[in-house]
Amino acid sequence: MITALSAVTLATRDMAAAVRFYRLCGFKMLYGGETAGFTSFRAGEGFLNLTTEPAEIRWWGRAIFFESDVDGLYARLLAAGHKPQAPPRDASWGERFFHVTDPDGHEISFAWPLGKPRE
């Protein structure tokens, strides 16, 4: 029986830009960094990993992370010059969410269940 997702690993052509983006989003770096070939962040009980890949990255899907302050994160990203696809909104499936593209074109979503207290 599968009990959890351990990690998502994303390819990046620019580790420094990717590390800055994910730190801005609130991920805590465990090791690696702007000049490393591999960087790992804590994502709740799991991990978000970045690996350097010089080839062109094509659309692959979307990773969705729970973030208790969806609106605050959206504001921080806008202030830093990032362009989320749309402002946060309440979805019919019971989450407040928004999508943003990271520096390598990966689609990342941040969501929080409606009615759940912020952590």
Image (cartoon, grey):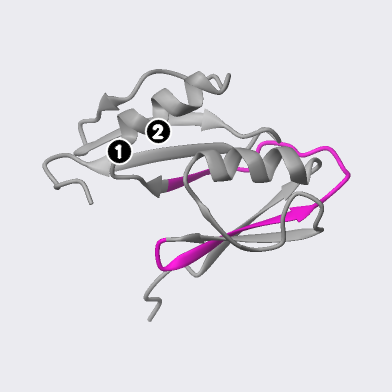
**x, y percentage for residue 77?**
49, 27
**x, y percentage for residue 22?**
57, 44
At a point 83% along the width and 37% down the height, the residue shown is 56
- 33 and 52: which is toward the camera: 33
- Residue 119 sits above or below residue 106 on the image: below
Distance from disc 1 to disc 2, alpha carbons, whole Å, reads 6 Å
**x, y percentage for residue 80?**
55, 23
The part of the chain drawn in magenta is 44-64
At a point 53% along the width and 63% down the height, the residue shown is 47
At a point 50% along the width and 20% down the height, the residue shown is 79
Q: Which residue is mark 1?
A: 69
**x, y percentage for residue 27?**
50, 51
Q: Is residue 39 magenta?
A: no
Q: Secondary structure at mark 1?
A: loop
At a point 40% along the width and 76% down the height, the residue shown is 2
- Residue 83 sits above or below residue 38 on the image: above
Instruction: Please identify the quarter of the rendering in which residue 98 is found.
Output: top left
- Residue 38 sits above or below residue 107 on the image: below
Q: Residue furthest left?
A: 115
Q: Is residue 61 visible?
A: no
Q: Is residue 75 left or right of residue 116?
A: right
Q: Amino acid at mark 2?
A: Leu
Q: Which residue is mark 2?
A: 73
Q: Amino acid at mark 1?
A: Asp
Q: Residue furthest right?
A: 54
Q: Is residue 66 visible?
A: yes
